[in-house]
Amino acid sequence: MIGKPATDTPPSRLGLYVPFALLAVAILVHAVYWVMMSGRIHQSAQAWIEDKIEAGYAIEYSAMNVRGYPFRFTLHLSDNDVSAPASAGGWRISVEHATASAQFYNLNHWIVGLDERVVLDTVIGAEDAQYELLSEQAQFSLMTRNGVTRQIGAEITGLTVQALSGPQPLASAVDRLAMTGRMSETGELLSGFIVEGLRFDASRLDNPLQAAFGETVQLLQLDSVLTEFDTLSLEGDPLAWTRADGRLIIRQTRLDWGPAALTGSGEVTLDRQIRPAGRLSVVVSDPESLISALEDARLVYDEQGAALRLAAMMAPRRDEGIALPFLLQDGGLFLGPARIGDLGALN
């Protein structure tokens, strides 16, 4: 007897739909998460603004909303006007648009961006002043942990500063400014900055100084450690910071300004009159050009210049140049044996 041939069962199409179903569920879950978190971010921003207003700040804006779906949260504020109380400097900043963005998977790292035009109102001496700041890009980075800010950063490119009223600014333009700061596990503030293409306003720079060094600082760089930062931030008293053995440890600094090509390292603190005091070891690549420029700028007299040349001849020589001591002492600024400036007390 011949049996019936087995009929083939058609394959199930369920396996084809499962990945698409999972993707749809993931998109739905992410959309719900984004909507919920955007509401919380909006509320947190409003609460932060209210706290600042209670602290004496005046903050105004025309609109606040959260955008950026699906990959990030971006808080937009329009027509912003922020004024600080007199105890915090009494300044005022006006900017048309400001944003704060974070990736949806990391709300501990925010990037703040400002419009290309910012208007700053402040007081210089006893005179009201207003400045227009124009930049190609102005961004600030903020990293938190458990609600506490642990690291900050800033980068501004193509910055120009113009006085709308009041005295002209000392610096009229900067090609690039970058700054970083973070807290170490031992309570020290690790910070650094780099300034490229800093141009002084010709009307604010002394003519001999301008002729000797030029109007543009090609590079200014600093890498430092501020010890006992908690004492300084909590007490707000520089003398208390000094008594706690607070120091500014300069790990690396560099200046390229015309004939001044310098690198250095050392430590700075404050004396009893709250004046900077300390010592740096400065390496000068071309001492003769620097000394001649100091003489031309009338920062040193001929006798001091002769003493500097003698000190340069006797100074230790390195691959990068000769090493000279740079002292901040008794309200004076000394390069080797020559006093090149004065230092007042910090306010």
Image: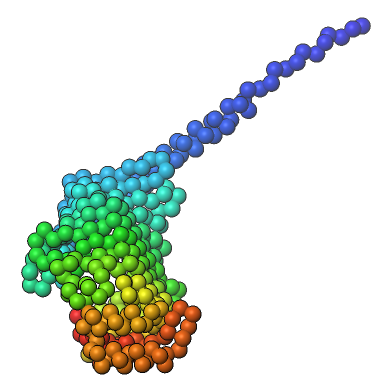
One can see residue 314 in this view? yes
Which quadrant is home to the N terminus? top right
- Is residue 319 rendered to the left or right of residue 277? right
One can see residue 40 in this view? no
Q: Residue furthest right?
A: 1
x, y (%) of residue 24? 49, 32
Query: How many badges with numbers are in the image?
Result: 0
Q: In the figure, residue 208 lies in which quadrant?
A: bottom left
Front-most of residues 202 and 269: 202
Front-most of residues 211 and 91: 211
x, y (%) of residue 148? 37, 65
Q: In the figure, residue 93 lies in which quadrant?
A: bottom left
Q: Residue at x 52, y 34 (%)?
A: 23
Q: Is residue 97 above or below residue 261?
A: above
x, y (%) of residue 324? 38, 87
Q: Residue at x 10, y 73 (%)?
A: 125
Q: Residue at x 22, y 80 (%)?
A: 297
Q: Residue at x 42, y 47 (%)?
A: 104
Front-most of residues 208 and 144: 208
Which quadrant is home to the C terminus? bottom left
x, y (%) of residue 337? 31, 92
Front-most of residues 341 and 345: 341
Q: Residue furthest top?
A: 1
